[in-house]
Amino acid sequence: MSWEQAWLAYHCVVNYEDASYFEAIYTLESGKIIDNALEELRLATNKMFGKSIAIERSMPQKGICLMLIEEISLNEAGYKIERKNNLIFLSANTQKGLLYAVFALLRLAACKVSLSDVHLVSVPDKEFRMLNHWDNMDGSIERGYSGNSFFFKDQKIEVNERTKDYARLLASIGINATVINNVNVRAEATDFITEPYLKQLRVLSDLFESYGVKLFLSLNYAACIDIGGITTADPLDKTVISWWEERMELVYQHIPTLGGFLVKADSEGRPGPFTYKRNQADGANMLARAIAPYQGIIIWRCFVYNCQQDWRDKKIDRARAAYDYFYDLDGEFLENVILQIKNGPIDFQVREPFMPLFGKLKKTNHMMEVQIAQEYTGQQIDLCYLIPWFKELLTSRTYCGEDKDTIADLLEGKCCNHKGRGIVAVANTGNDENWTGHDLAAANFYGFGRMAWDSKLSPEEIVKEWISQTFSDKREVVMVLTKLLMMSWPVYEKYTAPLGVGFMVTPSNHYGPNIDGYEYSKWGTYHRADHFGIGVDRSLKGTGYASLYNPPLAMQYEYADTCPDELLLFFHHVDYNHILHNGKTVLQHIYDTHFEGAKKVEEMLSMWEQLKESISPEKYERTLIRFQQQRNNAKEWCDQINSYFYRKSGIADQHQRPIY
């Protein structure tokens, strides 16, 4: 199958005043990463400017110079780009830093940024900038919306030109780690820690290393039973401990550069320490001790909850689960354990409060998990540029009692005893020709990497970079696509789940509306709508979840009158006639936003159609089909939601629009 080069297509750049710098490269450095940096410069120069670039061993009169330096402030990944006379100097402490500098220089050129007085110093503000893939050995992808896996096919690991291009894409936006297999480790994937697979994985790990990317693997916690023949996986059992020590030694003999393992335990049917009446720290630490001699890391997901709960019980609350299981264990985890915490307490909804563990954990390494695979936000059929949502999360204050108290500060290790280690996204790629199914969904892939590197970048700044590199730097194209992408998340929120209630989706596939689909189920994702009102009571009179936040957030969320409108139904059960801060009743707001959202999608479709002559025919037609699907989906959401609540409440729309 063929594939496109995404934002690394390196379109022809005309009338660029600084193209003359791309005549010669000078460097005395050598190594696999340097070789890849030079290869990238050659490829890009040829495509962007239609000329070859020479590699010089003596300083040229004009050109680009790559140099390793020693500057503490740049750390192991930062770089500098500066002009001195007729030379552009790219400098860094490491080869990886130089590779990032090359991609940054090419990004500047593709966006026609002047190099005449360039002085760019860039250091990533987060240690781990990671992707999690949910790929399976049979080639399928759990929650995959852009084709099958390009890592696996027919129970085999694939390493080819596409894998190399994937590594290039990661390096170009500063992503430095990736997990290639599903957190739900099943069947043959359990055998990744056996010799036949380890030999294949070494090839993949070496390829990733040459682009500054660490390979991680998802691990089956019960592998000692499934492939070791032991009758228990009790983390305190000496036989289990010994088996894992021997297994980690074998793994690192074959893959000495492996970053470590991601573990999903005691969740949604996955085995874990709870089976043996042990806590989550017992399980994580057992593996961490076994991997410690090889500087390996155990990333332990906090997505642990009871998925067999009784919908009749209004005191049990899935939103509390991660906090209740992990908060009291703060300080019990070893230093080479990182807790991976979802951004919100439920499951990647279009709007949730941030998880209260952020700002509360002071003694445990942790990172934030977001999702760019749009499981609940349109599945790469409906357009939903998520970077504005992530930006809102990163700028949220945790009120942890320190001067720097936003989630960004936390993930950058600037507060809470410097235990924040970075950010990770569930990936949205597959083997579709354009990588992400919907051509515009690649903005989430690109945008996540750029924001993971630098939290201060604005979503609009990021998307304009991506458009210029992926489509065109023509003013009309940049203007229309920027507007489309920036409006897409608010529009999606308008026509789907109102006021933070979330999860009114079709069970299992999670696309399209089904208001009561999960209402009487075991999964704990309820909206509690009745004849009088809607919402989940998470105040002290309900589940007590609101009180888990630091003051003053806990006080703000505790009362319906002070709770932000966009989260009201997440925290409170209120009457349909409850007046919001915007002056509308809850029900009228639901009617209005759903009609507005569906109408806005019609506008988005028209905006795309304006670009027909400016976009390649293939990309235009592919994306047109997606917008038409989104239009149908938005109408279905609008009509089903409004009809449901009209029938439930008996209260008419003030504007007498059609409700069924």
Image: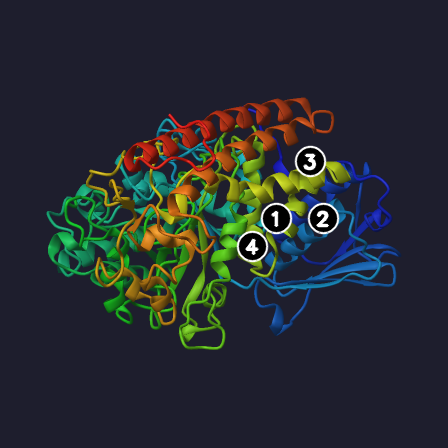
Residue that label 1 marks:
172
* Crowd class of label 1 (few under 14; some 14 to 19; many from 20; radius 10 Å): many
State the SS at label 1: helix
The reply to whether dot 1 and dot 2 touch (C-beta < 8 Å) is yes
- Residue 251 appears left or right of 418: left
For marks 4 and 1, the one nearer the N-term is 1
Residue that label 3 marks:
471
Residue 336: x percent and y percent?
35, 64
The residue at the far bottom in this view is 402
Say the numbered circle drawn on residue 451: 4
- Residue 450 appears left or right of 521: right
For marks 4 and 2, the one nearer the N-term is 2
Work out how far the residue at label 1 is from the one at label 2, CA to CA, in angstroms: 9 Å
**Camera-nearest residue between 373 and 606:** 606
Residue 266: x percent and y percent?
21, 50
Work out how far the residue at label 4 is from the one at label 2, CA to CA, in angstroms: 18 Å
Residue that label 2 marks:
106
Amino acid type for the residue under numbered disc 2: Leu
Quadrant for the C terminus in the image = top left
